[in-house]
Image (cartoon, helix red, strand yellow):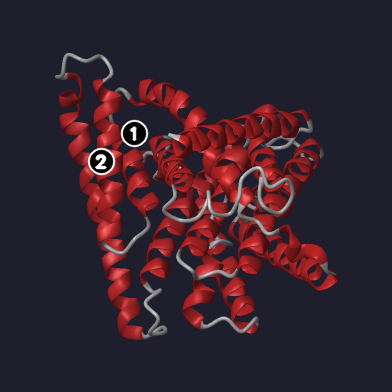
């Protein structure tokens, strides 16, 4: 009974810390997730010690609850992503997404290998540099009333595409962590397996849902659309692990499939209480796992500067080159809008730590980089948009 009471007390402390951290961050015009992670670092073993390392170790109840939170988070992200929407964003968005994945992935892989990590671990590190946090950028654009601008449409479209590419890359690098190094045959097999899983589940699943979504409403229970799609989420999350992929990939695909139902917006609304309850545990636990002692010397701080610089320059370069057809000024706005890694980089860092791929130092560096890119982007993007003339809607074809 005492053990159960202690878990409840820890959950209470984590949840309150998340709310306080998010409130402070939002008052400072920063994403709430930044405050939640910072709160985790404060109450974790490195500072106050209100949550100890044993409580957040892999397999412990709090860690499992955090994992459920991130699975639901990726399901919600997928719920906002439709295949049809990807076809409308145009060639510019596609080029921004592809180059915005290739450039950071290559630069980060070379840096990690230079730091004496083997190639398979270097690829895992690089995966954390790839995906843009569409949520952070979208929120900034919405607050500025700039969502309808051509640059904004390219940014948001590219963010959706590169999230999918990031999920694919993550599936490959997770499956490569077998300890046998990187071999051409194994890469080809893993690539085929990952592409096959994503393509079959995503492509076939969305079409099945379009034609047969009525079965969601057949049960008498008015909550059946939500409960049945959550069952799909958990089922595909498990199935993806059976293919050697991360559970969040299956959850993301389940969300994409569920987005095809006419109940899509109702599902998004019904998911909000679940996300409000469970996802803070993931971000606070993520912060609690950061060993702040890693940054106690100048060498570590210099390393953080280098990692963040690679993250910023690589995304800026990829986004700029992909959107150059829009003109240098618009391409710069697009490049900056693609910089924040946010929760995506943090999720991958957490997976790497749990899998034993990352050391505490690499984990702390990646989480800190993800936070810094999320903090510096909103003010820079707002400054650029305020000084750039609005392009008329008639120029939309430039993005396509």
For the residue carrying disc 2, how many other residues have a C-alpha within 10 Å: few (<14), some (14-19), or many (20+)? many
**SS for tag 2?**
helix
Q: Position of residue 373 (x, y in %)?
A: 70, 52
**Residue lying at 50% horizontally and 81% vertically, measured from the top left:** 119
Count residues near mark 1 (Cα–Cα under 10 Å), then give few for <14, some for 14-19, many for 20+: many
Which quadrant, please, contains the N terminus?
top left
**Residue that mark 2 sits on:** 206
On screen, residue 177 versus residue 141, left or right, reads: left
Q: Residue lying farthest front?
A: 2
Q: With respect to residue 140, does 184 lie above or below? A: below
Q: Nearer the viewer, residue 85 or 57?
A: 57
Residue at (64%, 83%) from the top-left corner? 114
Instruction: Pick whichever, 276 or 123, lies toward us.
Output: 276
Q: Quadrant of residue 165?
A: bottom left
Could you say where residue 216 lies in the image, as x and y percent from the top left? 20, 25
Image position, residue 360 (x, y; %): 62, 66
Q: Position of residue 395 (x, y in %)?
A: 59, 39
Q: Residue furthest right?
A: 298
The residue that label 1 is drawn on is 259
Q: Residue at x 68, y 28 (%)?
A: 143
Vertical side of 387 occupied by 163: above or below: below
Give the residue drawn at x 41%, y 38%: 72
Q: Earlier in the sequence, mark 1 or mark 2?
A: 2
Alpha-carbon span between mark 1 and mark 2: 8 Å
Res 222 quadrant in image: top left
Q: Are marks 1 and 2 in contact (CB under 8 Å)?
A: yes
Residue 100 vs residue 211: left or right? right
Query: Which of 261/344 is in front?
Result: 344
């Amino acid at each position: 009974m005492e053990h159960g009471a202690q878990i409840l007390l820890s959950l209470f402390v984590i949840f309150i810390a998340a709310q306080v951290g998010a409130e402070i961050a939002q008052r400072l015009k920063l994403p709430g997730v930044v405050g939640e992670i910072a709160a985790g670092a404060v109450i974790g073993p490195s500072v106050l010690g209100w949550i100890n390392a044993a409580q957040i170790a892999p397999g412990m109840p709090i860690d499992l609850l955090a994992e459920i939170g991130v699975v639901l988070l990726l399901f919600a992200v997928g719920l906002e992503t439709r295949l049809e929407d990807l076809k409308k964003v145009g060639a510019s968005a596609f080029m921004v997404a592809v180059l915005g994945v290739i450039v950071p992935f290559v630069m980060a892989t070379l840096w990690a290998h230079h730091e004496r990590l083997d190639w398979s671990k270097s690829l895992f590190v690089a995966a954390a540099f790839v995906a843009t946090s569409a949520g952070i950028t979208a929120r900034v654009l919405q607050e500025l009333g700039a969502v309808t601008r051509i640059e904004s449409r390219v940014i948001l479209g590219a963010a959706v595409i590169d999230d999918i590419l990031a999920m694919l890359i993550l599936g490959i690098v997770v499956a490569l962590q077998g300890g046998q190094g990187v071999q051409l045959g194994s890469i080809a097999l893993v690539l085929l397996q990952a592409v096959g899983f994503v393509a079959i589940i995503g492509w076939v699943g969305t079409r099945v849902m379009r034609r047969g979504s009525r079965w969601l409403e057949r049960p008498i229970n008015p909550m059946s659309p939500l409960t049945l799609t959550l069952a799909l989420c958990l089922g595909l999350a498990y199935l993806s692990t059976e293919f050697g992929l991360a559970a969040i990939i299956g959850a993301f695909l389940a969300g994409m499939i569920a987005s095809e139902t006419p109940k899509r917006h109702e599902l998004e609304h019904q998911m909000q209480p679940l996300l409000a309850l469970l996802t803070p545990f993931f971000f606070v636990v993520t912060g609690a796992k950061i060993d702040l002692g890693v940054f106690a010397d100048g060498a570590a701080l210099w390393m953080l500067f280098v990692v963040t610089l690679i993250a910023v320059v690589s995304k800026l370069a990829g986004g700029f080159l992909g959107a150059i057809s829009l003109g240098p000024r618009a391409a710069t706005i697009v490049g900056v809008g693609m910089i924040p890694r946010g929760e995506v980089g943090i999720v991958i860092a957490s997976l790497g730590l749990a899998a034993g791929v990352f050391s505490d130092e690499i984990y702390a560096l990646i989480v800190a980089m993800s936070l810094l890119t999320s903090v510096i982007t909103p003010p820079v993007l707002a400054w650029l948009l305020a000084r750039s003339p609005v392009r008329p809607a008639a120029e939309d074809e430039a993005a396509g």
